[in-house]
Amino acid sequence: MSLLTTTPGNTKPSLSERYAGVRGFTDRLTADLGPEDATVQSMSDASPVKWHLAHTTWFFETFVLARLDGYRPVDAAFESLFNSYYNTVGTPFPRALRGVLSRPTLDQARRYRRAVDESLRGALDAGLTERDPDAAAIIELGLHHEQQHQELILTDIKHAFSINPLQPAVIPGGLDQEPAVAAPDTGWTTFDEGNYEVGHADAGFAYDNESPRHRVWLDAYQLRNSPATCGEYQAFIADDGYSRPELWLSEGWATVQGEGWAAPIYWRNDGGDWSEFSLAGRIPLQADRPVTHLSYFEADAFARWSGARLPTEAEWEAAAAAQPIVGNFADVLMQSGLAPHPAAEVRHAEDDVGPLCRLYGDSWEWTSSSYTAYPGYRPPPGALGEYNGKFMCNQYVLRGGSCASSSDHLRATYRNFFSTAARWQFSGVRLARLA
Amino acid sequence: MSLLTTTPGNTKPSLSERYAGVRGFTDRLTADLGPEDATVQSMSDASPVKWHLAHTTWFFETFVLARLDGYRPVDAAFESLFNSYYNTVGTPFPRALRGVLSRPTLDQARRYRRAVDESLRGALDAGLTERDPDAAAIIELGLHHEQQHQELILTDIKHAFSINPLQPAVIPGGLDQEPAVAAPDTGWTTFDEGNYEVGHADAGFAYDNESPRHRVWLDAYQLRNSPATCGEYQAFIADDGYSRPELWLSEGWATVQGEGWAAPIYWRNDGGDWSEFSLAGRIPLQADRPVTHLSYFEADAFARWSGARLPTEAEWEAAAAAQPIVGNFADVLMQSGLAPHPAAEVRHAEDDVGPLCRLYGDSWEWTSSSYTAYPGYRPPPGALGEYNGKFMCNQYVLRGGSCASSSDHLRATYRNFFSTAARWQFSGVRLARLA
Amino acid sequence: MSLLTTTPGNTKPSLSERYAGVRGFTDRLTADLGPEDATVQSMSDASPVKWHLAHTTWFFETFVLARLDGYRPVDAAFESLFNSYYNTVGTPFPRALRGVLSRPTLDQARRYRRAVDESLRGALDAGLTERDPDAAAIIELGLHHEQQHQELILTDIKHAFSINPLQPAVIPGGLDQEPAVAAPDTGWTTFDEGNYEVGHADAGFAYDNESPRHRVWLDAYQLRNSPATCGEYQAFIADDGYSRPELWLSEGWATVQGEGWAAPIYWRNDGGDWSEFSLAGRIPLQADRPVTHLSYFEADAFARWSGARLPTEAEWEAAAAAQPIVGNFADVLMQSGLAPHPAAEVRHAEDDVGPLCRLYGDSWEWTSSSYTAYPGYRPPPGALGEYNGKFMCNQYVLRGGSCASSSDHLRATYRNFFSTAARWQFSGVRLARLA
Amino acid sequence: MSLLTTTPGNTKPSLSERYAGVRGFTDRLTADLGPEDATVQSMSDASPVKWHLAHTTWFFETFVLARLDGYRPVDAAFESLFNSYYNTVGTPFPRALRGVLSRPTLDQARRYRRAVDESLRGALDAGLTERDPDAAAIIELGLHHEQQHQELILTDIKHAFSINPLQPAVIPGGLDQEPAVAAPDTGWTTFDEGNYEVGHADAGFAYDNESPRHRVWLDAYQLRNSPATCGEYQAFIADDGYSRPELWLSEGWATVQGEGWAAPIYWRNDGGDWSEFSLAGRIPLQADRPVTHLSYFEADAFARWSGARLPTEAEWEAAAAAQPIVGNFADVLMQSGLAPHPAAEVRHAEDDVGPLCRLYGDSWEWTSSSYTAYPGYRPPPGALGEYNGKFMCNQYVLRGGSCASSSDHLRATYRNFFSTAARWQFSGVRLARLA
């Protein structure tokens, strides 16, 4: 049932339809979580679900509704409480303490969502975007912003639930359990050397960090046809992967020893039986599912052990440019009531795209590229200039999209980024090497 | 309305009545808290309200119900989840992560309470304490244990709410606002030198740490008739109390500088207007209310600045032996719908006990005595031996009881204890000096 | 050769003679250390030897020489550099960074010593103490202060050398290796209940914290005749002493687990062979030597495992009042060229004092008494008031004196104190129990 | 006197001559340091001078002398003590504790140097490199390794001395004080777009990380003709540069606030007078000297404030390819007895190279490029493979060379690298922008 194609509608949805669709999907994702679930924060990297619900709403209120003459905020206190990191807007409430905020309650956060939704839909109906073309662009940005937070909602609450000895399911519907019809393709696809264009070009939405489109020279290279699987990663562990310093970056080895890492974060070995914690609770490990929740350090060590390396983001994008956005995505899985998780199946789409596959869905793929500005990059003026640019340091780029992403949120030029020790995202590895 | 006397009932309540009373009071204290409120943990010293509700229940299930033939636990997972620190019982869930546990929910915790209450009342009705006299003693211990946690519920959630910019009220009923009819009595009461008996003697309940009763020699000394007030503490601040190292213990001074302390934890100065955060929300500071939420370091520095010192616990107990347990207590305040807070009023009870007053209620009073074993102290065998003895190190004794204590939980021999930097308890200071 | 009696001279040495003696002993203790040795600081609790040499000199310069008309300091920068913690004198250089100060050099520190010695002896010759009686008292205090630092010099450099894989000897002369002539006496001496006087009384020197002399009631008790030995402590380890939480204070157990303690700090087990690091380098463990370098937590756990407890400081002092100050001391050992270390031998002095023995020398003995002010204690005015009083918190008292103490530095009322996790002092344990 | 050209000798020195020269220069750099100076370690990023002396020697012993039949190490303990991070060789002594090692002494470290020098020269004389060509390559690597440590010796001891209130001079000779003959050139040099070759190509020495030479596409860009000066950086400070979050990377801003940064690490403002700590002690700040000791965060914020950005390492190398290696270097300064420090003077060399100048010397120049592997990079086999590759993560590349570098150690392809908060290196900034 996986490797799902995004359904190409006959007509592109209107901004208003798209607003309703994205906002509604957030509600569906969180429908099975109670007030307690929505309140907890398991580490300072993560945020409470309640905070995500309100922050994404605050974004529309602060950057769109506040442009309306005479608009009065739903609650003046929310400006600081639900500001993530926009220093230009004011002083954000300290991130590490978000989990201490029992008020506003989940119910109040949901009412805040409805109030802002009503105002914004009213403004759209009243012709906001005709009068104020910038507003349309900001709403579009806000929807992609919300889709990013949808993924964070899943990964953050998954992390919290993983700590709970009860090991609860975030999404009670279970996993897609169809058996793999074929082993993952371990062949390689070759790309010629040359100058490639990368970065955002067409008329569709993209973040500022995907621009300007620019040229890069690439030596000839190869990408592995499939992402690495749990079975391959088990072989790395069995070969003492976590005990051999020569396989690791120096900082990675220090992390392995300091944190006592011996397997991916959600894996557990009970008397020889490997299991992993998923959004559907704890499940037996399946060798053919793509491995996920790897840190950059683990992805890099695994690649070295494999006699390969991580791709650069330009290599990844050059390869992806010709590929349709097909994969195993949250929006389609949730329509079937299934919990997002990497899929074992490797059945190809009808419009077969060759052996290189699964660039999207399942897991984001770590690249060896540090997250940095493209030549000529300029952040937008004002507070929205803080969206991306100020994080361009000590983070590495991931490409593709995961089972926790929505299919209409992704594109070949999309640059996700996390720090090298982060493990709570759906992040995996695709091998690369020089041709 | 304060300085409330405990109502001397004509008949002592039965164990069953007392069980119903104490357990029910926990419910009343937490009635206005929602699932989100019950889930948050603002620091590792504090616990979620939900955890307190379940842990006190776990105590009865583990130490009483488990004695019954064929008793089946409500949920096997609770043994670890709600074990606070009894290594003898098993490995407790890590304290600092209690706030990550969204499940069991508040509703489940309350159902756990009702299930255990039903079993325990059933057992009492079936003659448990006749067959098993130890069970009666453990139930009595469990009730005092629960009363301790009632106080922690109030101080823990107060701390969490104080961080919330919304500054919500824990108890919405407001404070006792009657004006003081007289200034606090700043005189001193003198006690003669001699050998005094301290420690638990009579037939009533006491913790193991109050025994054995034993002799101590005391040089002649004086206690201040009233606890120190907010007004007196404001004078200490105005006299640069927080900026003069000579007033502080060395470790206290390091804490003042490291933590940036400049006033008691819940005080705030907005352009010259002092306020404090209370269980009823933020209120203007009132000079005649006893000062509370002082650390040992602050109490000690204030005493030194005052030209006095903290009393020893023996001095305090010798003075209290002759006093009735009257004061401003949580049980009586809550009956009137008021939020527990130190009371400004100093009207005396009808059975006047002399000028030394307010030994109980308002705030626990720091003593200069390190918490240690009495001569011949022996902890009880088994897990309950972990209740008190293993904390006898690097903590200091507080005496009396606070506005967050219940009147029937206190006695002259009661030894409360906290570490020297702890500020989130209702802890104040009564001056002492040699006669 | 051990259990050395202090040589009772016919005539008490003059202040000038005593000054020369104490200052000279510091030089002898450090004679075998080079500039590099004198510079290192292995933890913030410890100080470089060079710093000790200068700080003790600073004490005489600041508190004695500065009283002289027209005295000009040797170097103005030393006021801050070699101030330990006297806020009244100025802002001390940060303690944790003392090991970064390569200048002044060891040679300069020694010249500083000689310059101050010359000035001070000149002042004494010119009749300083006749004109200024307080100066005599401060010099006496300065000499005892220096003797405290002599002990710290040994323990601090021992700690640094213990980390060095070369395991160098601080004192190259080796240890007193005479075999024990008898097993340690494991009997007990009983003391009757009653009111005892403790604290400093006679005309000799004492620190402020030993006063006022005052009465304490003691229940009847027993002290073990000998301090605990390495052999007894090995039995504790063999009985899983470091793995059983029920033997430990809660904070001690957290320390054992957090720090990975499994034996005293300088012990090592190489394939079953126990050794310990000493001032003479690494040596095989000898069962009959008193165990030393225990933290309070370890002493307390060992006592609990032994079915006993630590004595209170009053119990210790009441027992010691009748005992001569005999033992195994640094001054006598160094005269024979031996490195200070607890002695295996238990031969008694000729003026036999009964079975209770070895109260002084070998190791300081932990008491269960928190370090606190005696009733009526008043620190002296001015900077010297910071000597003792401000540390009366979260520290525990040790009594007696160790193999690193000088015999003429000790007395029954002496109160040493350290925090509960400190292990780098010569600190051991003598068991106590109620009679 | 600055902007010194490397003296082009008529004949290239032999390996033996070069060995003697590099090793001897280390001795000259450290000639004025005493045993105490050579022992201190002011932070875990830095190492004691003594350790540098021994570690560079260990390198030759471990990787060259150990290849000789029957070679016996000078001291078996040194293998671990002076191993920096080569896990393949054994377990290194913990880096943060190097400053605790008083033994071996400075004198022993110097004797170790002489012993290894003698053995190595003997082997060279006996035809080692003819029999074992790899040995010659490793010796060459060892000499460049030692030159890196020469720079670290200066920066590490400078950091330690900067903490010392005495503010001692590392190099007593003073600074080059000639006044600037012209203001720094604030013009820009433009480079055309195109594919450039970067990386090591010729026959000379280079580290593994400079290979393979490879193609990169560069958009047209400009480099500022001179590095930024202290005067320009003062303007950044005066414009509230350290108080405006919009100028900083998010992680940089957190560092500014967490560490309280308000100026470069060695700058001090005493009542309006700016000074900086130099290797010659504290000196008044001179506006025309290049600013140095900037972290990546500071360089990046300054560039943003300037309306420019940092160059990429490829932009820097493409510009440098045509430039001679001229500048203000440690080897030449030390020949004149001067302490290495950025020079105010901007007089050009006779063989004028155009307005773009001072690419080498004064300060390393931060690039925006994360330190990563070149396409096709392969670390060498064995322990020497740990030299560079394992640090390719969360570090940023600096180019050029500083006043603490030797002129014959540098080349256009050289890649230095440090983490983003590092400030103790001679690291500055040259602005870049798109053409």
Image (cartoon, coloured by chain):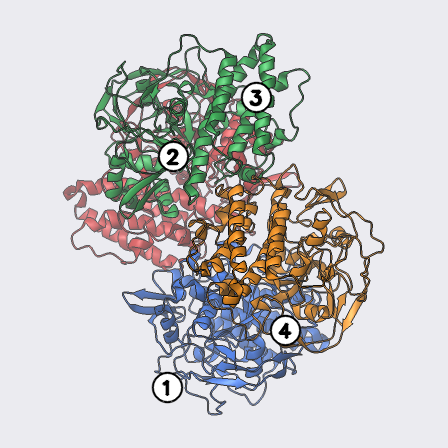
Chain colours: A red, B blue, C orange, D green
Residue topped by disc 4: C201
Mark 4 and mark 2 on one chain = no
Viewer-closest of D332 and C253: D332
Q: Earlier in the sequence, mark 3 or mark 2?
A: 3
Residue A228 visible within the image: no
Residue topped by disc 3: D60
Q: Chain of mark 3?
A: D
Q: Residue at x 72, y 47 (%)?
A: C338
Viewer-closest of A330 and D32: D32
Q: Nearer the viewer, mark 1 or mark 2?
A: 2
Residue topped by disc 2: D280
Mark 1 and mark 2 on one chain = no
Q: Quadrant of residue B312?
A: bottom right
User: Dividing the image into 4 quarters, which one contains the N terminus of chain B?
Assistant: bottom left
Mark 3 and mark 4 on one chain = no
Label 3 sits on a secondary structure element that is helix
Between the residue at mark 4 and the residue at mark 2, the CA separation in whole angstroms equals 58 Å
Between the residue at mark 4 and the residue at mark 1, the CA separation in whole angstroms equals 47 Å
Question: Does residue D121 sit above or below D346 in this rendering?
Answer: above
